Image (cartoon, rainbow, N blue to C red):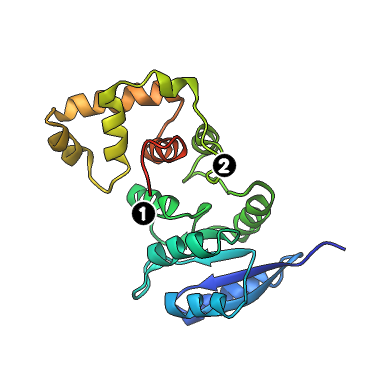
Amino acid sequence: MNEMRQIGIVDDNAMFRKGLAALINLFAGYRVAFDSGGGDECMATLRAGNIPDILLMDIAMPQPDGYVVTAWVKDYYPDVRVLALSTMDSEKAIIRMVKNGARGYILKDADPAELRKSFDEVMALGYYYNDLVTRKVLHSAQAIDGEAATPAGLLRLTDREVQFLRLACSEKTYVEIAADMFVSERTVDGYRDTLFKKLGICSRVGLVLYALRNGIARL
């Protein structure tokens, strides 16, 4: 008999939360262990010993928000696989959630089949990739929680490229990064495009994952 995997849901919209729980309970092999209306309630539930395999995490909640709770879960319950579930599809939101420990990122309007697929993959592989966090990006960074490696590409980076990578891990825009580096926006675009080519990466999210994976930037 297959093991029943436990799911936790954290979202401040009660109607959405209850509807999602009903849907997930129809998935073979998965059941909702609890649903929480906010970060504080979620943290109290985990402290009480109700530890799910997967935690679906909304972002835009009253404090503490999903970013804060995800980082807390990573620190205190690292075996819990957090999947961000949000209406926000911005690069900044994705980067911040991944930096804080999310293993995947799903939009709330996703098809139920994608949600089920995300559960299967995050349990089998430790992370879930889709059009937002692409397969190529995550493969280039390797497993988020794996031990640091030193790919050949890392050895070919210049000091300025490393500086750019660190700044790319912040929430600064490329315009702000150019100002911090005292270069033109075109020069920053050049650093970005060169790194895309060197590292086989196609997005800023990929650059962030690469920097975290190789110790160039820290959480």
Q: Nearer the viewer, residue 112 or 53?
A: 53
* 132 sits to left or right of 123: left
Q: Residues within 10 Å of mark 1 (few under 14, many from 20)?
A: some
Label 1 SS = helix
Q: Is residue 159 above or below residue 30?
A: above
- Which residue lies under the disc numbered 2? 146
Between disc 2 and disc 1, the foreground one is 2
Q: Nearer the viewer, residue 44 or 11?
A: 44
Q: Is residue 101 above or below residue 21?
A: above
Residue drawn at the location 59% of the way across and 71% of the way down: 8
* 123 sits to left or right of 188: right
Image quarter for residue 214?
A: top left
Q: Position of residue 172 (x, y in %)?
A: 23, 45
Q: Nearer the viewer, residue 114 or 58?
A: 58
* Callout 2 touching callout 1 (CB < 8 Å): no
Image quarter for residue 79?
A: bottom right
Indicate which disc, 2 or 1, sits on the residue closer to the N terminus. 1
Q: What kind of residue is marked 1?
A: Ala
Q: Position of residue 101 (x, y in %)?
A: 47, 54
Q: Is residue 42 above or below residue 28?
A: below
Residue 93 marker: 1
Q: Position of residue 53 (x, y in %)?
A: 64, 64
- Residue 5 can be seen in this image: yes
Q: What kind of residue is marked 2?
A: Gly
Residue drawn at the location 12% of the way across and 36% of the way down: 179
Residue 48 marker: none
Label 2 SS = loop
Image quarter for residue 18?
A: bottom right
Residue drawn at the location 49% of the way across and 55% of the way down: 102
Q: Nearer the viewer, residue 141 or 196?
A: 141
